[in-house]
Amino acid sequence: MEHFAPFASNADYTVARVALEHKHLYRVYSEHGDLLASVSGKLRHTAFGREDYPAVGDWVVISARPEERKATVHGILPRFSKFSRKVAGNVTEEQIVAANVNTVFLVMALNNDFNVRRLERYLVAAWESGATPVVILTKMDLCDEVEERISDVESVAFGVPIHAVSSELNQGLEQLAPYLGEGKTVALLGSSGVGKSTLVNRLCGEERMETGGVREGDDRGKHTTTYRELIRMPQGGLLIDTPGMRELQLWESDESSLTGSFSDVEELAENCFYRDCEHRQEPGCAVQQAIADGTLDADRYQSYVKLQRELAYLERKNDVRAQIAEKERWKKAGAIGRENARRKRS
C-alpha cells in the first residue's frame, strides 16, 4: 500500500471501481458517478502483461474530470481475490475474469449441459481465486432427475453450497439473496447457454441482460452475454456477469486448491503401501483398489490426473514467463531512470 501513499495525500485523486471494460477504456463507479476512464501513460508504460491492467471488479486510483464524465486510472489497488484463466490458444497469458469477489457462483444447467467433469475444473479455479465457490444448478424445470444430479454434484463439491433453481418459474431464487447483500460482490461463471443472463434478470427484478431462447434439438440456451459487467443489485450488493466460457484453461493453482477439490483422491493416496506410489500397477495401491471396488469413480481419478499434468506444465511455462517479465521490468526501470537523468541535465 506504500506505493499508493502519494495518491492518498492528494485531494486530486480518489478511488473508483471498474464496472465495465471496453477496448482500452473502462466504465468506473466513483463518488462522482459513472465515469469513462483510460489508463495513464505511466501505468501503460510499466505494465508487462494483461494482468497489469485493470479488470472488472478492480479498485483503482483515479483522477476524475466530473465535468467531462471522464477519468484517468493511475494505479490498481491490491486484489483480495481474482478468478483467472489462461487466455485461449497457445499464448501463456493470464486473463482476469473477475477481481475482488467474495463469492463465485459456478452455474451449470441441469439439462443437457450437465457435466460433472467440467465442474471439477471450475471448482479448482474457484478455490484458487480466493473467493468462496457456490454451485448454482439452473433449469430445474427441464430436468426430471434433480435429486440424482444434486447427489452427483455433492460427490465432487465437498462442503460447497449447492442450490437448484428455475429462473423461468422463479423457483429457488430466494436462496441466493444472502450472497448479494450490502458490501458483497458475486461473480457469475459458467459455460455458454446455462441461463446466466436470465438468472441475472430475475435477481435484478428487471430485464437487464439480453437473453436467448433454447436451441432446438439439445435444449441448450443460446450464448448472449459478450462482455463482463459489474451490476448494482437491488439487494445492496454487486454482481459480475461474464460471457459463457467455451473452455476454462487453468492459470495457476497451488497444491491446496487441487487437494481441496479432490480431497477424496488425496486421502486414498495417503493409504497406499508405497509413499511414492504412482497409482498405476503398484502393489498395495489404495487408489486403484478404490477404483476396482467402485468407491472411486475412474473418470474422476482421470480428471484429477489430467488437472495435475496441466498445472505442472503451466507452472513450468510460468517460471520461464516470470523470468522474462523480470528482465523486461528491469529494462523499463533502466529506461525511465535514464530519461529522468536526461531531463535533469537539460
Image: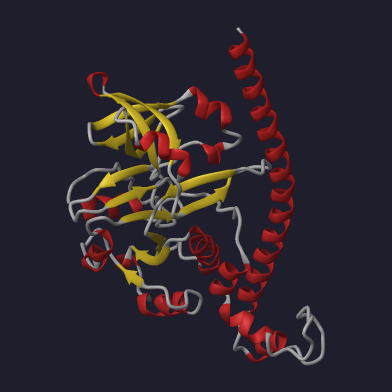
Q: Quadrant of residue 279?
A: bottom right
Residue 195, visible in the rendered structure: no
**In the depicted view, which residue is nearer to us: 270 or 325?**
325
Please give the name of the residue rendered at 63% of the width and 80% of the height, measured from the top-left corner: 266
**In the depicted view, which residue is nearer to us: 204 or 64?**
64
Residue 278, visible in the rendered structure: yes
Expressed as whole percent of the image width and height from the top left, the position of residue 170 reads 20, 62
Expressed as whole percent of the image width and height from the top left, the position of residue 159 reads 43, 78
The colour mode here is secondary structure
**In the depicted view, which residue is nearer to us: 286 or 214?**
286
Please give the name of the residue rendered at 54% of the width and 72% of the height, measured from the top-left corner: 261
* On screen, residue 66 above or below 148: above
Expressed as whole percent of the image width and height from the top left, the position of residue 55 reads 44, 41
Please give the name of the residue rendered at 36% of the width and 48% of the height, measured from the top-left corner: 241
Expressed as whole percent of the image width and height from the top left, the position of residue 330 reads 69, 33
Please give the name of the residue rendered at 61% of the width and 56% of the height, measured from the top-left corner: 252
Q: Quadrant of residue 259?
A: bottom right
Quarter in which the C terminus is drawn: top right
| Residue sitting farthest toward the front | 345
